[in-house]
Amino acid sequence: MTAVFSATFIVALLAAGVRMSIPILLPAIGEIYAERSGILNINLEGQMLCGAFAAFMAGYYTHSLALSLLAGAAAGILMAMLMALCCIRWGSNHCVMGITLNMFALGFTSFWYRVVFGVTTSPPKADVNVGMLEIPLLAKIPYLGDILFKQNFLFYLSILVVAATYFVLNRTQFGLQIRASGENPRAAETMGVPVKRRRYVSMLICGSLAGLGGSFLSLISLNRFVDNITASRGFIALAIVIFGKWKPWQVFFASLLFGTIDALQLRLQAVGVDVPYQLLTMLPYLLTIFVMVATAKRSHSPAALGENYEREKL
C-alpha cells in the first residue's frame, strides 16, 4: 500500500493520466463546436468507434501513421456528416438519431472486423510506429518533465487544438457565427449568418476530432481493435463538455482529471490494492455520474441546443 504514496507511483500515475486524457479531450473539443452551433451530437461515441476501426485497418495494411490518422479522421467525418444530414436537412431528433447511429457504428465495426479477420485468439496488431516526443530541456525537469514533456505527439496536438478553438470561438467572426447559430438561429439568419452551413462545418470539425480520438485508442493505446474499444468514452466526453461549461480550457483540465481517474483504477489494480477490481473499473463512470448531477443546475447550455432550424418561407 505504501507504493501508492511514493513519488514514483504518483509521477507514473499523472503521466498516464495525461496520455489517457487524449481520447477524451479531442472528441470533447469537437463537441464544443457541435453544441455551440446548436447540434446535440450524441453520436460522438459512434464517430470515435468508426475512427478507431478505420485507423486500425489503415495501419494494419499500410503501417503508415499519417495515413492511419487520416483514415480515422475521415471515418469520423463521415459519421458526423450522416448525423448532420439527418438532423439539419431532414429534421430528425438529435438524441434519437445519435443513439441510433451509435448502435449502428457498434454493429458495423464489429461485423466488418470479423469479415476481414474472423474470430482469432490472437488479435492482429496495427504495427504503426508511434514514439514519445521529448521536449528538449523541459523533459529534464524533475517530475514535471516525465509528466508533461515526454508524451505522445497527439497530446501536444491536442493542446494546439484547444488553443485554436479558444481563439476561433472567441476572437473570430466565424466563431461568433457558430455561437450565434446555437443561441438564436433565427436572429442570426436575419443578420446574414448561414446557420445551416455553420452547423455542417461544426459537425465536420467535431467528426474529425472524434475520429482522431478513436484513432488514438486503436493505434497507440491498444495497438489493436476490439469490440466497443471506446468503452463509452464518447459519453464521458459529453459529460466533460457540460462540466467544462462549453469552454475549451476548462474542458482541457476536466479531461486531465478524468484521464487521471481512469489511469488510477489501472494503477491500483497493478499494485494489488485490496479492492474489488470491478469497483475500480467503475471509477471513471461514477465520476461522470457525479459530475452530471453536480453541474445539472449550474450549467447553461446554448439556448437552441438540440433544436432543428428551418428558415421562414416568405
Image: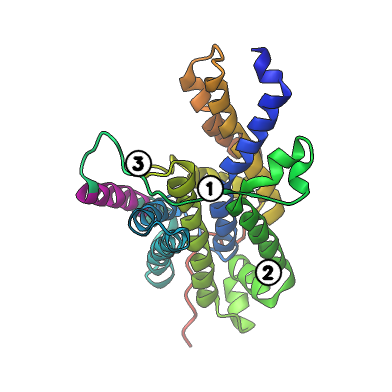
Q: Residue at x 65, y 37 (%)?
A: 15
Please indicate, yes or no, whether residue 134 appears anywhere in the rendered image. yes
Q: Residue at x 34, y 55 (%)?
A: 57
* Chain part drawn in magenta: 101-116
Q: Is residue 268 magenta?
A: no
Mark 2 is surrounded, within 10 Å at the Cα level, by few (under 14), some (14 to 19) or many (20 or more) other residues, namely: some
Q: Position of residue 22 (x, y in %)?
A: 57, 47
Q: Residue furthest bottom?
A: 314
Label 2: which residue?
168
Q: Quick one: quadrant of the N terminus?
A: top right
Q: Quadrant of residue 224?
A: top left
User: Tag 2, which secondary structure?
Assistant: helix
The disc, 1 or 2, on the residue closer to the chain's N-terminal end is 1
Q: Is residue 311 above or below residue 165?
A: below
Label 3: which residue?
226
Q: Amino acid at mark 2?
A: Val
Q: Is residue 14 above or below residue 115?
A: above
Q: Is residue 285 above or below residue 134?
A: above
The disc, 3 or 2, on the residue closer to the chain's N-terminal end is 2
